[in-house]
Amino acid sequence: MPELPEMENYKILLNELIISRPITSITINRDKSINMPAQSFINQLNNASIIQVERRAKYLLFHLSNQKVLLLHLMLGGWMFYGSEEEKPKRTIQVQLSFGAKHLYFIGLRLGYLHLLTKEECNKMLSDLGPEPLKPQFTEEIFLNILKERKGTIKLKLVDQHFISGIGNCYSDEICYEAQILPMRKLEKLKETEHRKLYRSMLQTLKSATTIGGYMEHPLYVGDKKTGSYDERCKVYDREGEICPRCKNKIVLIKISSKKCFYCPGCQF
């Protein structure tokens, strides 16, 4: 599932590609991917333009010239491609927004969705999200204060969108690895020095992953060399049985409340 760095990368690239270009046509191939009858959805989007793409947590918000918002959550298996009809992947397209000869294809939206909302409806849907970890106001001291009121397994708290928004399975494991902390430990049992290491590792990991395009498998457009570049840099995620680059022990996979969790037993404590 795409996480904060993947969606931030999409946001940056899409703001370069589609801003202020009128939507010339809309194709809906799966009604369940949207939140209203297809014709109503099409009527409200036709000839509107996207004036800004914003990210909140794992969501993208496409702000439209008609004051509406397209809220996207890719969920598990969802991705996007931007290009011509000749360039599009040989995959099932659930929703397609056309900008003349170029199209934005929404692919793999079996669990994901693209909902057309008012700004008020959108804000209400996202109102219970936790703080954005890369916002300047999310300081180390604020993080420490939040931890004073929270208990639970580190892995599960990091992926809890009410606790901190945007982190999922991949980056929770990478953050714990960078902090040299076992993901199955309890937040309330950590020392303050470990809380601080967790915060710094979180910022370092998310910033680094965002800068190099996240771990998404598919490029956004033909010639996109950035998207997915972080995949080969993951230290523990999806590396079961491989050698830890820090201590040379083997990476282990366990499950914590049905969530896959990768870590190094040699240098995480």
Image: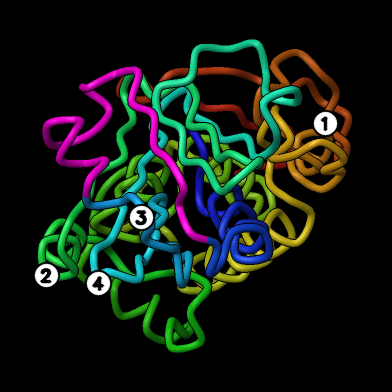
Q: Mark 1 or mark 3: which comes first in sequence?
A: 3
Q: Is residue 159 above or below residue 129?
A: above
Front position in the image: 77 or 149: 77
Between disc 2 and disc 1, the foreground one is 2
Residue drawn 43% across the image and 63% down it: 49
Between disc 3 and disc 2, the foreground one is 2
Q: Amino acid at mark 3?
A: Leu
- Give the percent coordinates (x, y) of residue 5: 60, 53
Q: Residues within 10 Å of mark 2 (few under 14, many from 20)?
A: few
Label 4 residue SS: loop
Provide the residue designation for mark 4: 67
Residue 147 in view of the camera: no
Quarter-wise, where is residue 126 in the image?
Answer: bottom left
Q: Are marks 3 and 2 in contact (CB under 8 Å)?
A: no
| Mark-to-mark CA distance, 3 and 4 | 42 Å
- Give the percent coordinates (x, y) of residue 61: 37, 59
Provide the residue designation for mark 2: 120
Residue drawn 75% across the image and 26% down it: 87
Provide the residue designation for mark 1: 244
Q: Mark 3 or mark 4: which comes first in sequence?
A: 4
Q: Is residue 155 above or below residue 88?
A: below
Bounds of the magenta segment = 22-43
Provide the residue designation for mark 3: 187
Residue 53 relative to residue 71: left or right: right
Q: Are marks 2 and 4 in contact (CB under 8 Å)?
A: no
Residue drawn 19% across the image and 61% down it: 122
Label 1 residue SS: loop
| Mark-to-mark CA distance, 2 and 4 | 10 Å
Which corner quadrant holds the C terminus? top right
Q: Are marks 1 and 3 in contact (CB under 8 Å)?
A: no
Q: Residues within 10 Å of mark 1 (few under 14, many from 20)?
A: many
| Mark-to-mark CA distance, 1 and 3 | 24 Å
